[in-house]
Amino acid sequence: MEWVAMYIAYIVTAVLLSALLAFTARNKLVREKEVTAILTRLGVPDRMFPVLATLQLLGAAGLLIGIFFRPLGIAAAAGVVLFFAGAVIAHLRANDAKGTPVPAVLTAFSVVPLALGAATL
C-alpha cells in the first residue's frame, strides 16, 4: 500500500513539475519580457533561449513518460535537478543573490519526483 501512495505522489509531482517546465519553456520561446530581462542579466545569449526551452520540454516529456517507464522518469528528473541547479549557479555567478531563491526551490522540488521515481522502480 505504501508503494501505491508513493507512486501516486510521483505521478502528481511529475505532472506538476512538467506543467511548470512547459510554462517556463514557453516563456523563453516567446521571449516573455521579464524572463528575457533576467536571462540577459545573467549573461545568457539570445541564441540559447530555444536550447534552454528545449531542455525543459524534454525534461517535462521524460517525467510524463516516466509514469509508465520509470527509468526514463528517473533520468529526466535527474536532468531537471541539474538544470535548476545550473540556474542557481548562474544567478550566483552573476552576483544575483536575490534571484537565487526561485531556482533553489525548483531544484529542491525537482528532487521529489527523482526520489519517488527511484523508490517506486
Image (cartoon, rainbow, N blue to C red):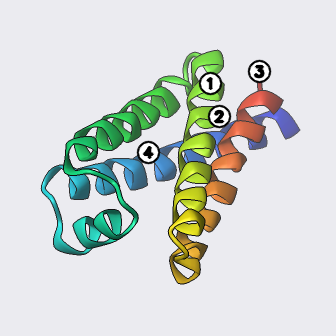
Tell me which corner region of the image, top left, top right, bottom left or bottom right, holds residue 5. top right
Q: Is residue 118 left or right of residue 97?
A: right
Outermost residue on the right side: it is 2
Which secondary structure, mark 3? loop
Q: Amino acid at mark 3?
A: Leu
Amino acid type assigned to the residue bearing label 1 in the image: Ala
Q: Secondary structure at mark 4?
A: helix
Q: Which residue is mark 3?
A: 121
Q: Position of residue 120 (x, y in %)?
A: 77, 28
Q: Hey, which quadrant is residue 38 in on the image?
A: bottom left
Q: Establish if 105 lies above or below 19.
A: below
Q: Are marks 2 and 1 in contact (CB under 8 Å)?
A: yes
Q: Determine the CA span between mark 1 and mark 4.
A: 14 Å
Quick check: marks 2 and 4 in contact, CB under 8 Å?
A: no
Counting residues from the start of the chain, the first of labels 2 and 3 encountered is 2
Mark identifier at residue 75: 1
Q: Quadrant of residue 50?
A: top left
In the picture provided, is 57 more to the left or to the right than 45?
right
Name the element at disc 2.
helix
Q: Quadrant of the N terminus?
A: top right
> Residue sitting at 77 percent across and 39 percent down?
115
Quarter of the image where the C terminus is located? top right
As drawn, the label of residue 18 is 4
Q: What residue does disc 2 label?
A: 78
Q: What's under tag 2, amino acid-wise?
A: Ala
Disc nearest the viewer among 3 and 4: 4
Whether residues under marks 3 and 4 lie with C-beta atoms below 8 angstroms apart, the answer is no
